[in-house]
Image (spheres, rainbow, N blue to C red):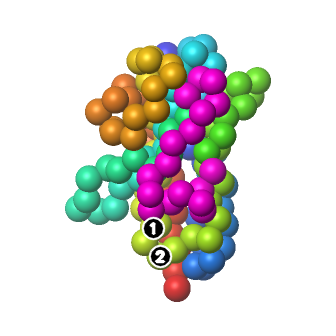
Amino acid sequence: QVQLVESGGGSVQAGGSLRLSCLVSGYTYSRYRMGWFRQCPGKEREGVAGIATDGRTAYASSVKGRFTISRDNDKNTLYLQMNSLKTEDTAVYYCAASAGNPLWIPLSKNQYETWGRGTQVTVSS
């Protein structure tokens, strides 16, 4: 059974950093494209960053230059390093996996089939 489990969320002041992790089990992780998404109450889930199987990455304009997505295929783990956090980054963050084209890096939630339960990130001023 495919399972994604996020960790690393928490509360931080604006300007601070957090690193999220997503432990993947149940399938050959290295063959799947991965992504991080976030959702605020009452808003649509939005794409934050994605990574292809060859390591190429894509970012939403709102986080480019501040967030870094990476993957460790030996540890079956996806990461999101978040620096220079802003209050508007407050959200529940989800990792997602897709068995689709592994070299494509969409940031649309409709392009991912498997989701974790999310981890809360709260940034205060």
For label 2, the SS is helix
Q: Are marks 2 and 1 in contact (CB under 8 Å)?
A: yes
For label 1, the SS is loop
66 part of magenta stretch: yes
Q: Amino acid at mark 1?
A: Thr
Q: Residue furthest bottom?
A: 125
Answer left or right for 58 relative to 38: right
Q: Is residue 25 visible?
A: no
Tell me which secondary structure the magenta stretch mostly adopts: loop
> Residue 5 appears in which quarter of the rendering?
top right
Is disc 1 surrounded by few (<14), some (14 to 19) or many (20+) residues within 10 Å? some
Q: In x, y percent, where is residue 59?
A: 50, 48
- The residue shown at (29%, 62%) is 41
Magenta span of residues: 52-68
Name the mark on residue 27.
Answer: none
Q: Nearer the viewer, residue 102 or 87?
A: 102
Residue occupied by mark 1: 90
Answer left or right for 54 relative to 111: right
Q: Nearer the viewer, residue 82 or 123?
A: 82
Name the mark on residue 87.
Answer: 2
Q: Is residue 12 above or below residue 70?
A: below
